Amino acid sequence: MVQLQKDDYIYVLDYLPKGKSEVPSHKRKPLAQAIGITYFSLLEVTPREGKSFEPGDKVYIGEGVREKVDHIERRIKYEWLTPTAKSELSHVLLQIVLSDEPKFVEFFNTTGIISTRQHKLEILPKIGKRHRDEILEERRSKPFESFDDMTARLKNLPDPGKVIVGRIIEELKGESKYRLFVPISQDSRQGR
């Protein structure tokens, strides 16, 4: 059996203090939609009694005592996000990417081919063969040190942080057969 990868922290994308409108009123309870910081798990969580959330809140959901979260309802699919959660997603993802910038710069410095015909860099949004070749040539001479270093050395390169965010969103939507950043979840309905 494959073990699900679990995030220890989430960022809240939307908080529904009265629950989802499609749930009968007698069964509604406060609920938040959130994204995991490490594995980008999309989750619905229930707050502890007397606690609430704001979009953008960073909340602990790992093992042990959880101050604000009573339990995780379930993993969800991108399509199940509320309009508010979808609109917050790119902002929160950019915050996650920028806070772990060295990890993503390392991706640009070390990533390789998918097949004999395609490189992983080419499946990033707004990165075609020309940008791929420029990145490969520049990293051979000296590894990139930051996103700023990349944009200084590579002319007309789209914002690397936003490129990564675009790719993560594509993977969350299930729009690509290749996964670079979001592991394939075994069961999106499964909670913990």
Image: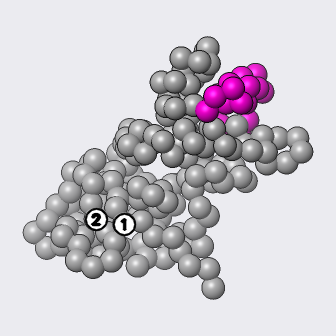
What is the span of residues highlighted in magenta in the rendered image?
122-143
Image quarter hosting the C terminus:
bottom left
Position of residue 2 measured from the top left corner of the image (x, y, whole percent): 62, 80
Q: Is residue 192 left or right of residue 119?
A: left
Which residue lies under the disc numbered 2? Answer: 60
User: If you read the primary sequence from the N terminus, does the residue marked by circle 2 or circle 1 appear first?
Assistant: 1
Q: Is residue 136 left or right of residue 154?
A: right
Which kind of residue does numbered mark 2 sit on?
Tyr
Q: Residue at x 66, y 43 (%)?
A: 110
Label 2 environment density (alpha carbons within 10 Å; few <14, some 14–19, many ≥20): some
| Residue found at the far front of this picture | 141
Dominant SS of magenta comes to: helix
Where disc 1 sits, the SS reads loop
Residue 121 seen in this snapshot: yes
**Residue 140 part of the magenta segment:** yes
| Residue found at the far right of this picture | 116
Q: Is residue 179 above or below residue 97?
A: below
Q: Residue at x 89, y 45 (%)?
A: 116
| Residue found at the far top of this picture | 155
**Residue 155 part of the magenta segment:** no
Position of residue 40 measured from the top left corner of the image (x, y, whole percent): 48, 56
Residue 93 seen in this snapshot: no
Q: Residue at x 26, y 48 (%)?
A: 55
Where disc 2 sits, the SS reads strand
Position of residue 39 measured from the top left corner of the image (x, y, whole percent): 49, 60
The numbered dot on residue 102 is: none
Tell me whether the residue at label 2 lies in contact with that at label 1, contact meaning CB atoms closer than 8 angstroms: yes
Which kind of residue does numbered mark 1 sit on?
Asp
